[in-house]
Every structure is written in C-alpha cells, then in structure tokens.
Amino acid sequence: MKTSLLTFTAGLALVAASAQADEVRVYNWSDYIDESLLEKFEEETGIDLIYDVFDSNEVLETKMLAGGSGYDVVVPTGTFLQRQIAAGAFQKLDKSKLPNIDNMWDVISERTAKYDPGNEYAINYMWGTTGLGVNVPKVKEILGEDAPIDSWDLVFKPENMEKLAECGVYFLDAPSEMIPAALQYIGEDPDSHDPDVIAKAEPVYMAIRPYISKFHSSEYINALANGDICVAVGWSGDVLQARDRAAEADNGVEVAYNAPKEGAQMWFDEMAIPVDAPNPDAAHTFLNFIMDPENMAAASNYVYYANGNKASQEFLAEDVIGDPAIYPSEEALGNLFTTTPYEPKVQRVVTRLWTKIKSGS
C-alpha cells in the first residue's frame, strides 16, 4: 500500500514511424515503481505511458466512484477494490490477453480472492503489512534497551508516547488501517463493522493524541530517514525505503521495521482496469508487461515490497526475498489479519471518528 497528490508524467513521446503510438494512462501510488520500467514499457510496446500518482485510497476512490477518471489502469488496495467492484467501477479482465498471468502466486491469489472472487477484475501488484518504523538507537535512548519496538505497546501506551513525543511520532492518515490496529491492540475484532466496537478505538487514540506529531501517509519516509522523527506507524516497504535512504546517507540514523507481535494488517494493492478506460487493450498490455517475472522483480527490488508473482522470486535481490520484514515466514503470515470494506453507513461512522481523532477534540 503505498504514497500528495504529486503528479508527474513519465513518457518520452515515442512516435511510430507511420502513425502515432497508442497511449495508456496509469494511476498508481507514489514512490511505487522503478521508473526505468516505465521507459522500458514504452520502448518495448511503442505505447506512450502517462503515469500519475496519488497517496491515499480515498483520493483514488473519489475519482473512481465519480466516473470518467480517464485512466486505463488504477491501483486500489483490496478492501477499496471490493467496494469499487460492487459499484461497477471496473471491467473484468480478458485473461486471453494476459499470458503472463500464469506467473502469479497461488498463496496470494487465494487471499486476494476475498476481495475479488476468482480474481476476475484485478491482479496483485504488491502486498505487505502495516506496522512500526523505528529509529532504534533514538527510541532505546528514550525508552531503554527493552523498548517494545515489536509491539503496539510502543505507540498505544500513553506513557511511551509521552516520552517519544520529544523525538516525533507520525501515524498514517488511513482510518481503514489505523482503526483496525487499535481494535486488534485491545483484543477486539479488527474487522468489526459494529459501530459500538469501532467506537472503542476512540479512547485508545484520544489517550495518545497529544503526542502524535502528524497524520500523513507519505512524509514519514523522509522524516524517518533524516532522523526528523523516531517512530512512524506505516507501510512495510515505505519504512524499509527509509531504512535504506538513511543507510545510503550514512547519517547515523538506524531504521528498523516490525510487524507488531499482537498482529498486523496484511494488505494487497491490486491493478485493475476502470469500466470506462479509454484504452483497455493497452491496459491489458501494461498488466501483462508488469506480470513478466523480471519486470515484477525489478519493481519489488526498487520499492522493497513483496509481490504476488511467484515466477519473479528467482530474480529478487537477496535483501528483498531474504528479508522476513518483506517476505514473512509461514508462521508470521499466520499472525497477520485482513479486513473487509465498511458498508456506507459504517464508513460514515469511521470517517467521523477519524476526523475527531485527528482534530483531538
């Protein structure tokens, strides 16, 4: 799951000798692909690629449900995909145009079928967990050597947060992930759609709200890497990008990622074709390109997220495939939970609650 409404266009206008090439418009999370793949796609296919980015499912959903997004491929997270399929926002994939679909990983496809039965509307791009990004030396300096860096206690215990506030703590601005995390922490069903259960997240957050520096779904990457904050509740690959940026800068910042031992949310970012896509044929060409094992591996090696392509694994860098923070063990996988989308009435409850939590009143 991935990162302000930055928009950029990746495309060296490749013009065919006799006629102008096709065009495909892709809307993906920011910082979420090796940009050399965009150039490679254009060179190999002769299709001009317009590539724009977003950093929240809510922004994407607003475009999708309004209709006429103008995009050929979009990348919602599984829970949002499910709701958008129900709303008629996507067209079924023509799998006869996707020979590389045989490369996909059944372990992940079985899980994504929860959101897209039969995986008829989407392919998995990346998947990961939501957990804790920590500046280890700084946190241990403040909380001691036994600081609970692998537990939700780190951020949900007010006495810890009060101390950590001096070095900065960011939370994702993502209610569909932050509310379930709080419910998991207090022993409730993280996938509950009962407003009375969801309401139990409020006191958890209000007790720590004074100590949260910011709610943002992308700024924490650089903030962690630069040492501007010491803790972020964020997405696994983002935190690992921060870790590597800090290491490259050799700035003395040591970042680690942990999926909390009490249980962390597992999410799936899915590539789908809008029902009114201007160029569905080119969209299928793009999806098939992405499902090429070496291309998918290049994307994972760049963004430090696991992908749903089994055939890509032989091309993954060792620090990706060999990192349990990216590809968890079978035992760790069993400790991860998934959620389902809120129906509209419950979504309004969650939105109001999150607005109240962010405002602190």
Image (tube, grey):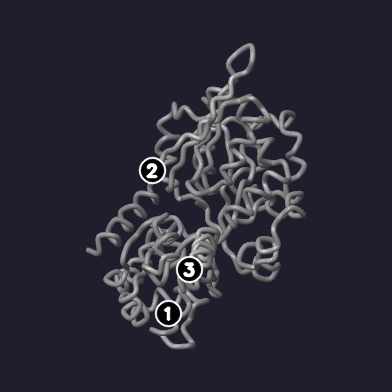
Residue 270 drawn at (x, y percent): 58, 44
Label 2: element kind:
loop
Q: Nearer the viewer, residue 295 or 66?
A: 295
User: In the drawing, does residue 104 fall left or right of residue 74?
Assistant: right
Q: Amino acid at mark 2?
A: Leu
Quadrant for residue 179, please give it.
bottom left
**Residues tagged 2 and 1 counted as in contact (Cβ below 8 A):** no
Q: Residue 66 got which mark?
A: none
Q: Amino acid at mark 3?
A: Gly
Q: CA distance from mark 2 to mark 1?
A: 31 Å
- Return the residue at label 1: 139
Q: Amino acid at mark 1?
A: Val
Q: Residue 133 got which mark?
A: 3
- Quadrant of the image for the C terminus? bottom left
Q: CA distance from mark 3 to mark 2?
A: 23 Å
Label 1: element kind:
helix
34 shown above or below 323: above
Q: Residues within 10 Å of mark 3 (few under 14, many from 20)?
A: many
Q: Nearer the viewer, residue 94 or 295?
A: 295
**Residues tagged 3 and 1 counted as in contact (Cβ below 8 A):** no
Q: Residue 5 got which mark?
A: 2
* Residue in view at x 56 percent, y 43 percent: 35
